[in-house]
Image: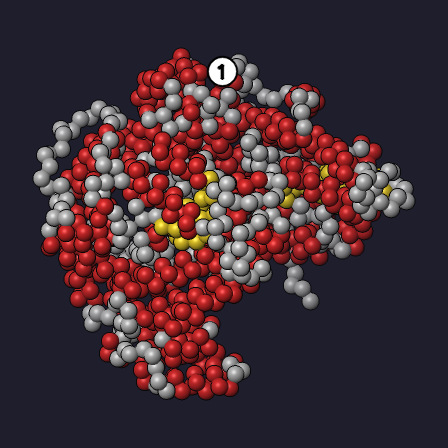
Amino acid sequence: MILSFSFTEETLPKSINPDRVSLGFINWQERLERVENSDLKQDLIELEATPKVKSLLTCLFANSPYLTQCLLGDMAFFSRLLKQGAEKSLTGIHQYLQESLALSTDRNQVMAGLRQAKKQASLAIGLADITGEWTDRRVVEELTVFASSAISAAVSHLLLELHNRGQLELKNPAVPEEDCGYVVLAMGKLGAWELNYSSDIDLILLFDPEKVNYLHDRGPQEGMVRLSRDLVRCLDDRTRDGYVFRTDLRLRPDPGATPLALSFNAAMTYYETTGLNWERAAMIKARPVAGDKELGQRFLQEIKPFIWRKHLDFAAINDIHAIKRQIYAHKGGARIAIKGHNIKLGRGGIREVEFFAQTQQLIWGGRNPDLRSSSTVFTLEQLHRARLISLKAEKDLTEAYWFLRRLENRLQMIDDQQTQTLPESDEGLAAVAAFLGYDTVEDFREELAHQLHVVEDHYATLFEDEHSPPQQTKNLVFSGQEATPELVASLQEIGFTDGNRVFQLITQWKQGRYRAVRSDRSRSLIAEIVPQLLEAFGKSAAPDIALNKFDEFLSGLPTGVQLFSMLQANPNLLDLLAEIMGSAPALADRLSQSPGLLEAVLGRNFFERLPDKNVLKQQLDQALDQARDFQDVLDFSRSWANDQRFRIGLQILRSTCRIENSSRDLAHIAECIVEALLPLTWEELKLRHGRIDQSNLAILAMGKLGSQDMTVTSDLDLISLYELTGEVQESDGDRPLDPTQYFARLTQRFTNALTALTPEGRLYEIDMRLRPSGNAGPLATTLAAFERYQLNEAWTWEHMALTRARAIAGPEDFCAKINNTIRSILCQKRDPQKLVNDIASMRERIAKEKPPAGLWDIKLIRGGLIDLEFLAQYLQLRHAHENNDVLHLNIRPCFQMLGEFGFLSSADTADLIDATDLLHQLQNLLRLTTGEKLNEETTAPSVLRRLATTVGEPGFPELKARLELTTKRVQEIYIKTITQFVTSEN
């Protein structure tokens, strides 16, 4: 059999992992047995019998699980690849992409086809690399060609799909990308024809509204954003077939504030007015790869004055001097450790070679067009020709660059991981050395160390003819374009760990990046309070997080003068602001959405408990009365609810309220929202579908809302129930619906009203999986069907959930009917043995599927909230038929009633109530401060102290001991109440 690869067995990488090799050949034989095509099967048998192929298989099995997977998953392609060679095989792949997938209108086919093509291309290019068929340059170029072709095929498919839907009119449907007005710009290594083996792809997506003939009424801006989102899904989504490329759109102008796709003029305006110097460097590598390439070339042509400036402006000069100072400080030369070294970002790595070239391009490229190449290596060559670097520098850096790129590709080829970090272990390092073909790991270490030091030396001497850097100062001077080591050290003394990030943020404020700091007055004010602000944030639980959150807060302000004046006049607010930003992420997010809340904190009653539910409902009704349309309803309801939740959260943080009161108040807020939005949503539905006479609908609250035990981050567990008291077959609107469709549609719209993200944020996440049959069941259920299901089909865990169920919205008599039905279900007499077995089994299943992360996993730990809830629910279901007074939505009063009626001992009752109070209080605090769980090692000591003092303990060690004792006691009660009575099932 003639092979197209001309390698010899001696030139292949070493194979030092016999276990992988053995497993690989076992899997080979298993896959071979499944091959149905007799000709293919015979070819594979003959290939395996060929010594060269067997050596190649051994090499692949030993060194690359990913290539092994690609090979075994498509043995027909592997056979063709060995016969045709990599180049011809890739030509076939590109033809398939452009002639088949690009013109397909089947999204599933395109998604699967792209992923199959990616695996085939990976295998072909990987074999060409491993066998030495291609140079390192050819390898990265072929990786780039495939990526470009795949993106092009995806864009063509999406454009054609829109055309066929009548949403977009293409100039030439046979060639969808032609003159379409939408272009994909490749950035980074993809733009420079230097893509690595498992690289992200950085893209900027642009469109010309004058060329895009978008027919849908949503308009070209939203239409191109949707197209862009679909493009990312086509490339990035992980399916059973894998993924194509991890896709990053964050190199576009101001990614935190701009849509995924920008108009041509918007992008041009940004770069011409506010583009930064790092963006100049990034745009050097920009290249149109898909869509309307002519449009992309026109954009790059027009943006040239931004990238290539003949006369450096002041900011650019500061950038260059800051870079020089950074290099000067770097020149000291710490020891390079091989194990765990990052060959991209570490000393002597790929980034330093790229930076070396790009820095010279920024300085000289405006005056010398020969220096405008996107290729790192070609730029080095041109720099030597221009006598800007020595021949030795060019040769050394080029050799090191390709050595490091080859190493990077082999690292990523192992498991298709985007990594540039060498293994920490001797075994891992030896495996990498073998994959690169070294006889010993020592030889590899020596060569790598040499190349890293070569790069480091050239990088550090880039500006050796410059004067020494200026004298250090301990003052917080935010000037230049990079933070000096002295400033970073001073910021670290204050409490910040990332001084460079602090410098970046403060500089952006000084430059007027946000609307709030664009006036001279606002910049003057914030400059005055920056020292106090940094001092306050430095004392917070997490200074860096606090400052980042404050930056997010600042970015949303329409103006800053009023806020900065307020902070200047009320410096105590800085401490509160720092406390919120550093200790309570949930509250910081809300403050970012509504900065005016900070002013409300100055009110005398801010830290007092909220009024009762009736007053809250009146306040919400007054706010919604101002709504002009349903969009206003959504915005005003979010504003009101989030403001109230912020107030409660801050009260919890400051320990000015009892947890049971705050939980009840949070439930009242949610109830008011549900009760207000349900009828308003119904009115919206009636505009199109009318109403169904003699019908009722109500919302059943479950979980923490049902038990009025909410936290500031709780979602809502809801069930939608309705009843028909007449014989109406459909609604009476212009588009009538039968009752099942009608109430399902209403429920869907209602949940959307609660979950939709608007400029005012989101109200709640909604979970409706507790409805009969879960996600498989209808969104809305009749009360009669619900009752039948609960009596005849429901699992024990569903009855456990019913102990916290109550109707909260709908006609009063219908809600009462629902509650009575639930109470009747709960009072059914149950088989005690089955009950205890079911509950114990469910607890063990939770422990297996969601093991606790440690002591501070308050919910899941043994003796935690789950065990408390299961105890209460078991005892209610066990004894409700004897005395229905034990039924209570909240487990704290439930334990009290169980104790009063003798179903719990007085000692157990007291301990369970104490445990409930402690764990609920901790859960609320953790949700505000550290999230669901707490990591003792990484959490700031100030946060740990706050947790302790809030629950009445002098310090964190005492709190930890109390928690351990409490959960141990709950676990003991759980065992003697439930576990010890479990029997094995027949």
Q: Nearer the viewer, residue 642 or 666?
A: 642
Q: Residue at x 10, y 34 (%)?
A: 468
Q: Residue at x 28, y 79 (%)?
A: 6
Q: How many marks?
A: 1
| Left or right, 481 with reference to 659 | left
Above or below, 605 against 947 in this view is above
> Residue 560: x, y in percent?
42, 20
> Residue 706: x, y in percent?
68, 37
Q: Residue furthest front?
A: 171
| Left or right, 791 with reference to 904 | right
Q: Colour scheme of this structure image?
A: secondary structure
In the image, what residue type sits under mark 1? Leu
> Which residue does the numbered mark 1 point to in the structure image?
602
Q: Is residue 202 visible?
A: no
Q: Nearer the viewer, residue 301 or 398?
A: 301
> Residue 90: x, y in percent?
40, 69
